[in-house]
Amino acid sequence: MYHQASCYQQHAEKISHNANPISPVISAMVMPLGFATNHRQSRPLALCFDCWVRLPMIRFFIGIFLCMIAVTGHIATANADQNDPRLDPLFADLQTPLSATAVQQTENQIWEYWLSFPDNQTIENTMTAAMLMMERGQLRSAERIFDRIIEREPQFAEAWNKRATVRFLAGNHNGSATDIAKVLQLEPRHFGALSGLGMIHMHNGDWQNALKTYELAFSIHPYLANVETIIEDLKKRLKGRAL
């Protein structure tokens, strides 16, 4: 298992040559370690809004998977995955004033429960293997494994979310959106899936639905990095179109 500090370092090395201010939003789709910061302290985006869709996004996803591996070595506990009752107080905590450290800890715990499948250790181990393949850019192989997991455990929301991610990376945005719809059916609070759907809407130039999706994600997780700024910029863009 990667140490958390080295995980952040490796992620930074992946993106350092072409930093993109929207990368924390992309990260939210799959990120179990959490780069979220207090939205009240978030800095303005450095690049223009138009650049967000045009700049390459795949490199950011690949870096994130290094961080995803770090939580897969946890000890599974009963009733985990999206049905874990311990998720409820964690989401309630996100609606309260929190320090940056508390936000990260809360988000990490949410992701850990989402990734857990204690009823079947084989499923957990297979998820880990597929995520490693994603990290290595073996997208087709990873997707096939997620296919098998979903076929065997169709109620496991995080398997759908990971396949949505790998499909997005492979350029299959329609397939990714279909998987995200299933994720949200199983776990309506999945701010990671909502962030991914917002990215798809932005890629398609659908600013109205992008705004609605990010507003919903923000209502669930008000500390998602840069999302508040993205929402304001989307509102400005839509206002300018109306004029």
Image (cartoon, grey):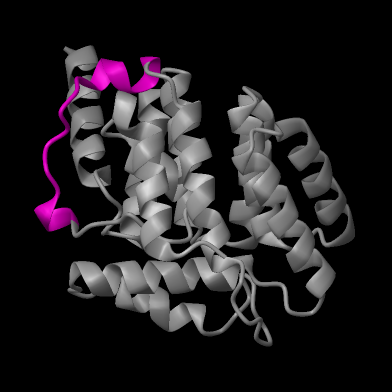
**Would you identify the image quadrant in which residue 108 lies?**
bottom left
The answer to whether residue 6 is seen in the rendering is: yes
Nearer to us in this view, 231 or 61: 61
Query: In the rendered image of this protein, does residue 24 appear above or below residue 116?
Result: above
Extreme residue toward the bottom, this view:
78
Q: Residue at x 63, y 53 (%)?
A: 183
The answer to whether residue 197 is seen in the rendering is: no
Q: Quadrant of the C terminus?
A: top left
Whether residue 127 appears in magenta in the rendering, the answer is: no
Q: Quadrant of the N terminus?
A: bottom right
Place of residue 72 in the rendered image (x, y in percent of width and height, measured from the top left): 61, 66
Q: Residue at x 64, y 38 (%)?
A: 136
In this image, 194 relative to 8: left or right? right
Q: Residue at x 43, y 20 (%)?
A: 56
In this image, 109 relative to 222: left or right? right
Place of residue 135 in the rendered image (x, y in percent of width and height, measured from the top left): 60, 42
Place of residue 164 in the rendered image (x, y in percent of width and height, measured from the top left): 64, 41
The residue stretch that appears in magenta: 39-54
Place of residue 154 in the rendered image (x, y in percent of width and height, measured from the top left): 81, 58
In this image, 153 relative to 136: left or right? right
